[in-house]
Amino acid sequence: FHLILKSHVAPAVDSEMAAQEETVDLASKQDGQIVTPWDVEADDDEGIDYDKLIDRFGSQRITPELIERMEKLTGKKAHPWLRRGMFFSHRDLEAVLDLYEQKKPFYLYTGRGPSSDALHMGHLIPFMFTKWLQEVFDVPLVIQMTDDEKFLWKGDAETNTIERFYKLGKENARDIIACGFDINKTFIFSNLEYIGHMYPTIVRIERAVTYSQAKGIFGFTDSDNVGKHSFPAIQAAPSFPVAFPHIFGDDTTPLCLIPCAIDQDPYFRMTRDVAPRLGWKKPALMHSKFFPALTGAKSKMSASVTSTTIFVSDTPEQIKSKVNKYAFSGGQVEADDQKKMGANLDVDVAFQWMRFFCDDDDTLRKLEEEYGPGPVRAGDKMLTGEAKALLIKTLQPIIARHQQARAGVTDEMVEAFMAVRKLSF
């Protein structure tokens, strides 16, 4: 560990921001909504108010000008989720684009907490977007499997053992690999396996974070096990290249870009607070909106509610049944009223899911005009059943392609992606 155990001089910067971030309360319910890494809930039927969340978290909006700059630098059209505002907020994305323009290095970091045998559709969002980022910017990627976290929060001595979560991590890695990541530029790691390599980085972070700060950010209580209190440092560690000496050596200059749902931001707010004190660069972030549960936008989709969750392992009939039975409708109660007025698209799950998974802008625009309020097809608006049928038709081939790709992922491929090795970049 001689390369990563070198001392770092902590520069005296960002002291005012550090003080502000130390006392902020991110864990309690405010403005009728709560957003933490473990709880997402809104009182309003339309779900989370993201403008309020940006103000509360202190992040910045991803503007049309920022998207335009990304397109000019990469020569690639922006991902639909950027154009449609599904990835809507950021921290220091301008700095990442500056580095790319200057041909200086950066890397990507995302992760997965393995709690089910298969990923659900919401889990695919960060991986599909991260794959696009990797292709567009041609940069290395590290993917953290937080099998330890799931044991700390959900474990027991009988069913949910540490061995079970470790195995789920390996199974989930198959779904991640099936997304099409470049093996030469991608390192997937289990915390239970790799933590020894990161431990010097983790200890430095732990020493820099006070209990008061962690409690304010994450809402820990005296009854929480001690592992929960220390876990944020483990999720923070991959934000710094010193956690991967086999990839970066002793080079601390590469910046980390983290695409994630905004409920993960508290981890990285803490990380960005401690980075200057450790002499490291603050990670940059791109935040996505939540993928709504089938039953409505008040909460995000959860793998623990299997009957109303669409998994990437579901059959075409299961997909059809779940959408038709559980997808919350923003349509009017009576068919005649729906034909006259159209649906409330802000709460309609079929439309909201199409915003994520329909790649064709024209198809989505047509659905919005014909199903929602407005002059198009006035008096003969699309019914909820038609909108759900369109969603089913969109989801079934996406999941079928994923299942076919996953079937080709062998044990040897999983081990190759998870091998501690040098990446090509």
Image: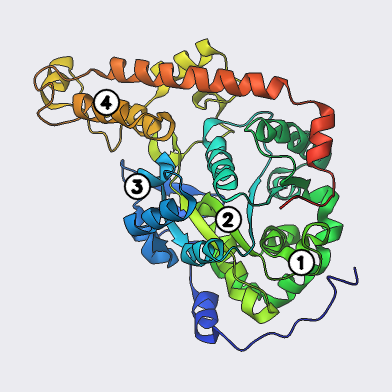
Query: Between tags 3 and 2, which lies in front?
Result: 2
In the figure, 406 relative to 136: above or below? above
Say which residue label 2 marks: 258
**Badge 2 density bin: few <14, some 14–19, many ≥20, Cα 10 Å:** many
Percent across and percent down for residue 330 are 27, 29
In the image, what residue occupies the spot 49% across and 79% down? 20
- Residue at the disc numbered 4: 367
Amino acid on which disc 4 is placed:
Leu
In this rendering, does residue 158 appear at all?
no
Q: Mark 4 falls on what kind of element?
A: helix
Q: Can residue 129 be seen in this view?
A: yes
Q: Left or right of 140: which side holds 218?
A: left
Residue at 50% across / 62% down in the picture? 97
The residue type indicated by label 1 comes to Val
Where is residue 61? Give x, y as percent: 37, 60
Q: Are marks 3 and 2 in contact (CB under 8 Å)?
A: no
Q: Which residue is drawn at 14% across and 19% down?
A: 339
- Outermost bottom residue: 12
Q: How far apart are the alpha carbons under marks 3 and 2?
A: 29 Å
How far is mark 2 from mark 1, CA to CA?
16 Å
Element type where label 1 sits in the image: helix
Depth check: give the residue in front, 390 or 297: 390
Q: Name the residue under label 1.
A: 242
Amino acid carrying mark 3 in the image: Asp
Q: What is the CA distance from the residue labelled 2 to the residue labelled 4?
A: 32 Å
Label 4: how many residues lie within 10 Å, few (<14), some (14-19) or many (20+)? some
- Evaluate if marks 4 and 3 touch, with contact meaning CB atoms under 8 Å apart: no
From what the image shows, is residue 355 above or below residue 214? above
